[in-house]
Image (tube, rainbow, N blue to C red):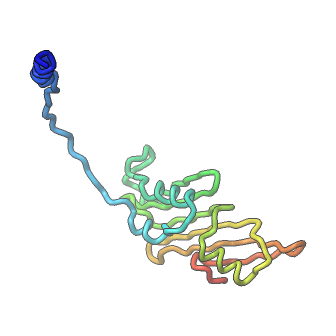
Amino acid sequence: MKKIILGLLALGLTIPAYTQVVKVEELSEVVVRPMNYKYLNAADSKVAAIPVKMLERKVAAYDVTEADFYQDDFDFYTVSFFIPDGKIVAVYDGTGQIVRTIEKFENIALTDAVKNAVLDRFPNWTVTKDVYRVTYSDNKGANKIYKLILVNGDKKMRVKVNDEGTFL
C-alpha cells in the first residue's frame, strides 16, 4: 500500500513538469468581406442539386480583384466556371460584385416541386433528359427554368417548368 501511495505521489509531482509552455503570439489582421450574398439569396435554391449549389457557391466566393488579369481600368470581367454537370458564366463589376450570370446544368436531380408537377400532369411519362437554366441579373433577380424531355413509349414531348412546378 505504501508503494502505491509513493508511486502516485511521484507521478503527481512529475506530470506538471512535462506541461507545455504556452507562447503568446499576435496574429496578423484578417479582412472579412461579404460574399455576393444577393446572388446567393436569389440563385441558391434550398432544394437544388448538390452540383448546382457547389458551383454557385464557388462563383459567389470568387474574388475577381485578386485574379492575375484584374486591372482597375476595366468595368466588367467575365469569368467562366465549369464542372462535368454544368457551367456558369458570371460577369463581375470592378469591385468584385456579381452583375449577372448565365447557368446551365444537364441531367441533374429535379426538385420535389418539379417532380410532383410532372407526375400530376403526365402520370405515365418518364423524364429522359433535363436541362436546368438560371439567368441572374442584379436588377431582376434569378429566373430558374427546367427544360424536360418526357417519353411515353414512342411518344416524345418537351416541356418547360419553373423551379416552383409551374408549367410555362
Q: Nearer the viewer, residue 39 or 163?
A: 163
Name the spot of residue 94 as percent of width and height, x first. 39, 59
Q: Is residue 21 left or right of residue 154?
A: left
Is 80 drawn above or below residue 147 in the view shown? above
Q: Position of residue 97 (x, y in %)?
A: 39, 62
- Left or right: 1 in relation to 39: left
Figure quadrant of residue 124: bottom right
Which residue: 73% across, 77% down?
159
Give the residue drawn at x 70%, y 83%.
120
Q: Quadrant of residue 163?
A: bottom right
Q: Is residue 163 above or below residue 44?
A: below
Q: Position of residue 92 (x, y in %)?
A: 44, 60
Pick the quarter of the image with the C terminus.
bottom right
Whether residue 41 is visible: yes
Which residue is rendered at x = 13% and y = 34% of the image?
24
Q: Is residue 10 visible?
A: no
Q: Nearer the viewer, residue 73 or 14?
A: 14
* Left-right relation of 19 to 88: left
Seen as rendered, the residue at the extreme top is: 3
Compared with 12, 56 (above or below) is: below
